[in-house]
Image (cartoon, helix red, strand yellow):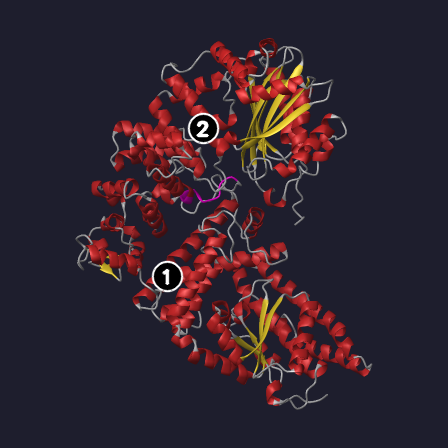
């Protein structure tokens, strides 16, 4: 074997030695891969290939050896993780060691056997440098291996061949390798231009080859770039962080967070480390205590967050067998189980796990704020200068803050650092002054607030001045969101209202809510403030008018603050919230009548949403019954505003024109009832008005044709559809022939849905078959109603949306028509065709949606209302309608509401004799058959399949 030049001697043995103490999870990393034995085996296999005269056979000969070693090492690390699942964060060092060992062995083989170079020139020296997370020696199970091949000058043919061969071996091992080949001058030039390259080089670590090259790179980076560009690097990294947050979602409380890139995730922690290393030569995050950026307690919080996030990420990779970074709902359940979280009477184990996740994400935000304050104080981060200049202009250079406060670098601080200890109410005064003067609070002051939260005791909570300030913060200063959010971030909100503290970082394990409970609550308050500022007048005319005419703002803001405060208690959250309101409102200074109204609003904050989305608003009984529960126009107005804010605060896309139309209709119908019915015509009057309106819409029809059309329909038809729909059915009826259905599809812009109208000869099962045909075409039915004419024609209207809650796309209309025609002609068997569509998706498998079925004979004058609450799926409406039809039940209308994975379908029905379902035995039998239909259509999800 040809000897190597001295500067190319392999470093496998020396570099593979574990540090002492070894931070990894495996006790002795060298037992993961026996590097000397594997190197000998690879050398032997390569020698055999060379002896056979086929140097190209080296690669296929050594790859199986490396693959087996890699598999054994991965298995050993996975076993160690399984034995200590909460210590999985330590395994990142084991994976880095494993990857480094494999890379060195392949490089050794490359220079010893594949591309032998007895006398390299000065241009043919080379070094392999680990960069990025690999350079930091922190790798998740399937992280990329980021390599820099460093050369003194321009790349040579020999170096190019060596690198190519090494990469092919690594790729054969199914390793994902990020690589670049550069000279030192190239590295410096590119690092000056690109902050990502600069950051990866900041974490460079010598791996193999010419060590002097790697040391020269490190020396020149610091002397020629890093040491002189600290403030610039800080600004670039913060801009990069903000852009990343915008891409991932600006909240750290998204219910399916990205563990690596999301707000409060690992990348945010790494950004602190990068800046710390760049400015202070910190070798680790622990060194940030040494340089005075963090206290030891703050570092302990940082270390705990880092360990938790890495533990989560390691399990996430292993669970998926690939580099997945988003913590999806199904993964949350599995990882929570692995980490030992168990269900209790109040919360599921997965909710407890995610509660801890969001607490750590919040701590990352706290630490970031502290870190940036330290940078600002040391003048390596830009201060907020524009606002400071404006204040200086308008105050003629005087300090514009109130008594007891001062400006520090353009930010608000207490004049006396012991002010909180002297009077803890000063904590609230600090936030009051910040919002009143529109001056951001200095992070040092926030740091002291967080350190003195224990001073907010019952004495402070019951202090009249403290409660006055808090209520003023909630009600005033244009938009209270900024103050509430900051108070929540530093823990003041939970300390001042302990019941609120219980919902901080509390997640609800379902697909409907996008945010944690505290984040949702703050967003609802922000929505109310936006309405008050008249910024949503066009989108929300009714609630905007209610607010413009003047209401008791204290009632509305406090009700929103408390409406979900009972969640996570294990009891009905509306009842618990009402109990909290009964105690808290007087403490905040509300009058008895205000307290009574807040208590009622919190207790009933879901009432209007439920009625609007789960009941037939065309039935006059709906508004009358709702009015009886609300009792007064005042309550109705408050409840309407609260409901709109609540729904809009759930998450993006949840609020739409369909929900707006439902709430607007219910409000208008109910206000008429509550104000004496002066504007509410009787049923005969409404029927006559509908017929007259149809006459105006069909002005080209003769009087006799209009009279015939009006005579064909019973009274419910005239009350159930609007004039536009009456005109559609009149035209469809004209073209009806034999048993062929007539169909018209058009956008109903007012409802943000597509309306599909059918006219055909009536026979049992039409509703179910139409529902099945629509489901097969991928349409989500949100409302449906059907009536039969005096001459036996079924008139059915369905309002449909796509999966994102938008009107059905024009491009998919042809498929919709084909599906309906095929199903109605018997060419497509809906149940068979829906079987594959009804399988539970992996992401949704762990949601628990118990099936509940109820019968209501009092909610409508002429129908029984059957309400079915169960897991949503494409074929649900079809199966329920088919079961009802098979049991002699006639469906007049169906109201479909979907809340994430949960569907609530309400059917207005009669029996074969046109009567309500009065018999208990019949209702019980029907319930059993509906449950059987639900269970039969959905196979149990296979938990082993991933």
User: Relative to residue 110, is residue 16 drawn left or right?
Assistant: left
Query: What range of the chain is rendered magenta?
Result: 512-519
Which quadrant of the view contains residue 770?
Answer: top right
Q: Quadrant of residue 275?
A: bottom left
Left or right of 882 in this view: 219: left
User: Which is the main secondary structure of the residues drawn in magenta?
Assistant: loop
Quadrant showing the N terminus: bottom right
Label 1 neighbour load within 10 Å: few <14, some 14-19, many 20+ = some
Residue 663 in sight from this viewpoint: yes
> In the displayed image of the protein, which residue is found farthest to the bottom?
119
Q: Which mark is residue 405?
A: none
Name the residue tied to disc 1: 298
Give whichever of discs 2 and 1 has the lower sequence position. 1
Badge 2: residue crowd in 10 Å (few <14, some 14–19, many ≥20): many
From the viewer's perspective, is residue 617 above or below residue 149? above
Kind of element beneath mark 2: helix
Q: Which residue is mark 2?
A: 663
Question: What residue appears at the point 55 percent right and 32 percent down from the top-left corner?
Answer: 753
Determine the residue located farthest toward the front in the rendered image. Answer: 700
Observer-side mark, 2 or 1, equals 2
Question: Residue at horizontal 40%, vertical 67%?
Answer: 234
State the residue in front, 94 or 596: 596
Residue 823 pos. (x, y %): 72, 28
Residue 285 appears in the figure: no
């Amino acid at each position: 074997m040809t000897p190597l030049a001295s500067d190319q001697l392999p470093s496998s043995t020396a570099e593979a030695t574990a540090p002492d103490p070894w931070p990894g999870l495996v006790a002795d990393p060298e037992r993961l891969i026996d590097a000397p034995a594997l190197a000998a085996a690879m050398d032997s296999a390569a020698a055999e290939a060379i002896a056979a005269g086929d140097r190209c056979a080296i690669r296929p000969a050594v790859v199986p050896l490396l693959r087996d070693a890699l598999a054994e090492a991965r298995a050993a690390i996975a076993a160690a993780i399984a034995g200590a699942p909460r210590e999985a964060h330590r395994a990142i060092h084991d994976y880095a060691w494993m990857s480094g060992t494999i890379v060195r062995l392949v490089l050794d083989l490359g220079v010893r056997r594949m591309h032998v170079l007895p006398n390299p020139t000065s241009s043919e020296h080379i070094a392999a440098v680990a960069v990025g997370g690999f350079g930091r020696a922190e790798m998740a199970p399937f992280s990329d291996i980021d390599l820099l091949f460093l050369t003194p000058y321009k790349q040579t043919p020999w170096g190019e061949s060596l690198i190519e061969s090494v990469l092919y071996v690594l790729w054969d091992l199914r390793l994902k390798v990020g690589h670049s080949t550069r000279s030192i001058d190239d590295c410096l030039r590119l690092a000056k231009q690109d902050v990502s390259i600069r950051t990866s080089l900041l974490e460079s670590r010598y791996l193999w080859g010419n060590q002097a090259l790697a040391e020269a790179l490190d020396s020149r980076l610091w002397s020629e770039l890093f040491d002189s560009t600290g403030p610039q690097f800080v600004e670039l990294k913060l801009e990069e962080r903000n852009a990343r947050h915008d891409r991932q979602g600006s909240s750290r409380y998204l219910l399916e967070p990205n563990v690596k890139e999301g707000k409060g995730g690992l990348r945010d922690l790494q950004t602190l480390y990068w800046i710390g290393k760049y400015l202070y030569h910190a070798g680790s995050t622990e060194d940030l205590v040494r340089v005075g950026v963090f206290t030891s307690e703050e570092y302990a919080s940082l270390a705990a967050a880092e360990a938790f996030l890495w533990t989560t990420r390691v399990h996430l990779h292993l669970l998926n067998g690939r580099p997945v970074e988003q913590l999806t709902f199904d993964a949350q359940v599995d990882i929570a189980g692995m980490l030992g979280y168990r269900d209790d009477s109040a919360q599921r184990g997965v909710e407890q796990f995610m509660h801890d996740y969001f607490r750590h994400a919040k701590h990352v935000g706290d630490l970031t704020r502290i870190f940036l304050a330290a940078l600002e104080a040391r003048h390596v981060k830009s201060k907020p200068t524009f606002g400071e200049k404006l204040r200086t202009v308008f105050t003629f250079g005087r300090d514009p803050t109130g008594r007891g406060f001062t400006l520090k670098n353009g930010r608000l601080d207490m004049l006396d650092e012991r002010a909180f200890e002297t009077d803890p109410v000063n904590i609230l005064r600090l936030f009051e002054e910040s919002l009143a003067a529109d001056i951001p609070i200095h992070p040092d002051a926030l740091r002291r607030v967080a350190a003195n939260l224990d001073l907010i005791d019952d004495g402070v909570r019951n202090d009249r001045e403290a409660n006055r300030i808090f209520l003023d913060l909630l009600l005033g200063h244009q938009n209270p969101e900024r103050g509430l959010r900051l108070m929540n971030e530093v823990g003041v909100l939970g300390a001042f209202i302990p019941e609120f503290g219980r919902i901080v970082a509390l997640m609800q394990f379902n697909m409907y809510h996008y945010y944690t409970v505290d984040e949702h609550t703050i967003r609802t308050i922000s929505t109310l403030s936006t309405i008050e500022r008249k910024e949503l007048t066009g989108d929300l005319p009714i609630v905007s008018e209610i607010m413009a005419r003047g209401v008791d703002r204290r009632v509305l803001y406090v009700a929103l603050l408390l409406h979900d405060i009972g969640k996570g208690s294990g009891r009905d959250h509306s009842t618990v919230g009402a109990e909290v309101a009964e105690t808290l409102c007087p403490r905040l200074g509300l009058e008895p009548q205000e307290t009574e109204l807040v208590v009622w609003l919190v207790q009933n904050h879901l009432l209007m949403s439920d009625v609007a989305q789960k009941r037939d608003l065309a039935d006059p009984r709906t508004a009358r019954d709702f009015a009886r529960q609300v009792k007064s126009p005042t309550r109705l107005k408050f409840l309407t505003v609260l409901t709109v804010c609540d729904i809009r605060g759930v998450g993006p896309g949840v609020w739409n024109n369909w929900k707006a139309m439902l709430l607007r209709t219910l409000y208008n119908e109910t206000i008429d009832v509550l104000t004496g019915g002066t504007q509410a015509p009787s049923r005969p009057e409404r029927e006559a008005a509908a017929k007259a309106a149809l006459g105006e819409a069909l002005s080209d029809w003769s009087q006799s044709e209009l009279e015939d059309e009006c005579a064909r329909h019973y009274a419910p038809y005239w009350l159930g559809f609007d004039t536009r729909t009456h005109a559609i059915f009149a035209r469809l009826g004209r073209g009806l022939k034999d048993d062929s259905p007539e169909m018209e599809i058009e956008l109903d812009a007012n409802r943000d849905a597509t309306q599909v109208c059918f006219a055909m000869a009536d026979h049992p099962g039409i509703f179910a078959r139409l529902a099945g045909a629509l489901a097969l075409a991928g349409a989500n039915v949100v409302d449906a109603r059907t009536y039969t004419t005096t001459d036996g024609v079924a008139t059915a209207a369905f309002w449909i949306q796509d999966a994102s809650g938008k009107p059905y796309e024009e491009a998919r209309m042809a498929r919709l028509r084909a599906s309906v025609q095929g199903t109605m002609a018997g060419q497509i068997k809906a149940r068979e065709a829906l079987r594959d569509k009804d399988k539970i998706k992996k992401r949704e498998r762990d949601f628990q949606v118990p099936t509940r079925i109820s019968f209501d004979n009092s909610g409508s004058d002429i129908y029984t209302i059957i309400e079915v609450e169960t897991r949503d799926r494409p074929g649900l409406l079809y199966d329920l309608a088919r079961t009802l039809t098979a049991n002699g039940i006639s469906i007049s209308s169906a109201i479909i509401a979907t809340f994430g994975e949960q569907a609530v379908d309400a059917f207005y029905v009669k029996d074969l004799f046109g009567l309500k379902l009065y018999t208990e035995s019949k209702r019980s039998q029907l319930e059993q058959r509906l449950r059987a239909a639900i269970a039969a259509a959905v196979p149990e999800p296979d938990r082993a399949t991933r």
